[in-house]
Image: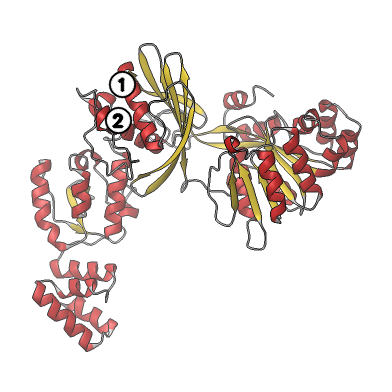
Amino acid sequence: MKTLTSLLERLNLDPEVLEACARNAEALGLPLERALYEAERINENQYLETAAARHAMPCELRLAALMDKEGSGWATDAERVCKVPLPWLRKQKVVPVRDKDGKLALAICHPSGWLLAQELGMLLGERLERPVLAREDDITDIINRIFGESTRSEGSVSDVLGDSVNAIDEFNEDAVEDLLEDSSEAPFIRLVNMILAQAVRAGASDIHIEPYRDVSRVRFRLDGVLYERHTLNKAHHAAVVSRIKVMAKLNIAEKRLPQDGRTNVQLGRLELDMRISTIPILTGESIVLRLLNQESISFDLGTLGMSPGHLEQFRKLISIPHGIILVVGPTGSGKTTTLYSVISQLNDSRKKIITVEDPVEYKMRGLCQMQVNPKIGVTFAAGLHSIVRQDPDIILVGEIRDRETADIAINAALTGHLVLSTLHTNDAVGAVTRLLDMGVENFLVSSALYGVLSQRLVRKICTACHGTGTDGAGGKCRRCAGVGFKGRSGIFELLFLNDELRSAVNRNASSSELEAIAVRHGMVTLQQDGEAKVAAGITTREELSRSTAEI
């Protein structure tokens, strides 16, 4: 073969090595390029190109990257693929795809897959064209993508449960290692897996499963808003809750007390961290799953949605060597993401960074992260009291909840540490009054506090449908599922404590006076920043009103 010959000339292999590979190929009945590949003398790309030339087969080394891209000539067919058992596809390392003419082809990583194409075509009821050679990793990625986003994951509850409703006894006491690989026949296992796959595909941050008198409701939180996704038979609720408890290693028998747990699951190559919370209510147990995708979060200040002016000011603020910087806002306003973005920028080998959190949501390299555990006395105050003796440069406190924590944080700031934390207040100046209400002395607040960032999250207008929720042909927009919004952006209010503000804090000035001083010195309020984003077409006035209604 000309291609193999030219490859061997370029490689300039040792004749003895080449001869050994040739003998091995002859003994096993393999092509020489296959023997060279298995002996790791050529890489996968070289093997595929050579094999494609030998068998006159098409070869695509970027199949996964090209799949479903406009004009690429390759597309997935989830409906067909989901008719084939997932374990079989993974074992054989093949996946049916559509070529540029819409014909069904078989992506394979070895030429011997031609016979499989014929067998698979009979199973699918459609003739498969000659296979296309592709990288093994690409085939795996396409399989994971299809089974994570396919019609199978979009199935209905009735499709999954069928006529079987009593499968609790079949639960495995071990957590699911890979949801896509779990082929258990237990219908409630498959139901929970389906709900998780749908939530991940939709980009949900939380799953709520709530029992009512006659039904159980499954809702997803998307971009901060809850949407109902499934309605379950009330008789199935306990089985679903038990399955989730098993995954989180919670007490299945205990239904009278709240429980909290955490577990890791895999969806293909996607690792998902889940926090599970259950509480007893009048109609059963309500369960909420917080989904933390460790791979999808980008902790970058530039992606938070700050205006260039805010971003420049905030970068200047976090560069101070010591003092307290607070991020404030209601629950779900993105405070944790902002703090992690700050830490990500400040993280370097020359600094000791310690965090005390409840819970530790994201594990970051280079940090010493402490989990709050009140059951054994590890509170924010106790944790903070201990870590100041660990010679830190930067301290992150998940939340200042009481005077003791506030006092320790302020003392740490005054003794040369940079302290980052959060408070639950409506605006930036509210952080000052909140600390004073906790009993912290005015002069300590004015001396230690350097800046406060107040924030909210607003939904962004979908760029595909421009907020209409339709695809132009009367159907739902695929990108935003017909909602009209996709993704969220922050709106911000940044308060710098200058000399005039410190003097006002010392004389116990009111919140309105503090805000007037800050505005006079150039502070852009939350409302003003939101109006700017409305004017820029990032969000709508209605969405801004929803997010800032309490201001």
Side of 196 where 92 appears, left or right? left
- Residue at (13% x, 75% y) in the render: 25
Residue 136 picture location, percent across and down: 26, 59
356 lies left or right of 79? right
Whether the residues at callouts 1 and 2 have beta carbons within 8 Å, the answer is yes
- Picture quarter containing residue 241? top left
User: Which type of secondary structure does the marked residue at label 2 adopt?
Assistant: helix
Q: Residue at x 28, y 68 (%)?
A: 45
Q: Nearer the viewer, residue 371 or 547?
A: 371
Q: Is residue 131 left or right of residue 321?
A: left
* Residue 173 x %, y %: 32, 38
Q: Residue 104: horizontal and vertical position, in percent?
A: 17, 47
Pointer 2 local density, CA inside 10 Å: few below 14, some 14–19, many at least 20: many
Residue 175 in view (yes/no): yes
Q: Which residue is mark 2?
A: 191
Instruction: Name the foreground residue: 462 vs 490.
Output: 490
**Which residue is denoted by mark 1 in the rendering?**
236
Q: Height in image: 324 above or below 1? A: above
Residue 475 visible here: no
1 vs 2, front mark: 1
- Mark 1–mark 2 Cα distance, whole angstroms, equals 10 Å
Query: Callout 2, which amino acid?
Result: Leu
How many numbered marks, from 0 up?
A: 2
| Quarter of the figure that contains the N terminus | bottom left
Q: Amino acid at mark 1?
A: His
The x and y percentages for residue 342 are 64, 49
